[in-house]
Image (tube, rainbow, N blue to C red):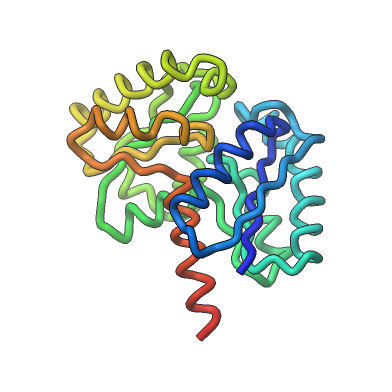
Amino acid sequence: MTVVIINPNSTASMTEAMLSQARAAAPTVHFEGWTSHAGPPAIQGPEDGATAIPPLLDLVSAAIRSGAQGIIIGCFDDTGLPEAQRMASCPVLGIGQASYHYAALRDWRFSVVTTLTVSVPVIEDNIRTQNLAPYLGRVRASDVPVLALETDTDGASRLIAEESKRAAAEDGIDAVILGCAGMVQVIDDVGAALSIPAIDPVACTVRCMSWLIAQDGH
């Protein structure tokens, strides 16, 4: 089976990081990583998301034509997800969407630790739209710009771990979801700092996709 991970931003190194994480999490699946070179370098808030959607949907169309058995939108804001799902007959998952539903299936109350404050309303709205608000503790900003996950990984990891520990202490939750695709760079450090699960949205989504494709084959 071939699953295409589409990164709606133009930072190819982030695509490669997601691809590496996906292959480790679901080694029996063939993944391809596609970068939207016409997208913004990072998606931080609704304006970047709106800019990213048209070139993203062009890539979704190309993935459909290529015969992909699954498509993953590699942005935690689930950028363009409803439009992409309407275009495709194969499963299309957003990494935010899959993470929320995974936590809900475990009956876990969760908080999200994302990058900047501008992303918080987008994520909150997505959770409400998916009718999962009862499971949400809080969406928290770590004040780490998306690209700092690449340029200052150690500093970003420290700030995200600190905010995740505050979430675990204050929000009455069972798990923390890391709210950015680029946080694959810091998941191990954050997970080690917590006494509750830290959900990596990329690994979570590729495992959900594997299950969906297997079910479609029966």
User: Please, is residue 24 above or below residue 171 in the view?
Assistant: below
Residue placed furthest toward the bottom: 218
Q: Residue 161 is drawn in which quadrant?
A: top left
Q: Is residue 204 left or right of residue 56?
A: left
Quadrant showing the N terminus: bottom right
Image location of residue 52, percent across then percent down:
74, 37
Report the label total.
0
Q: Is residue 86 left or right of residue 155?
A: right
User: Please, is residue 92 above or below residue 163 in the view?
Assistant: below
Q: Is residue 25 left or right of residue 168?
A: right
Image location of residue 144, percent across then percent down:
48, 18
User: Please, is residue 44 above or below residue 96 in the view?
Assistant: above
**Closer to the camera in the image, 72 or 131:** 72
What residue sits 55% from the left and 51% below the top?
A: 94
Q: Residue 200 is drawn in which quadrant?
A: top left
Image location of residue 25, percent across then percent down:
44, 53
What residue sits 46% from the left and 38% below the top?
A: 124
What residue sits 76% from the left and 34% below the top?
A: 39
Image location of residue 93, percent across then percent down:
56, 57
What residue sits 74% from the left and 69% below the top?
A: 67
User: Please, is residue 152 above or below residue 7 in the view?
Assistant: above
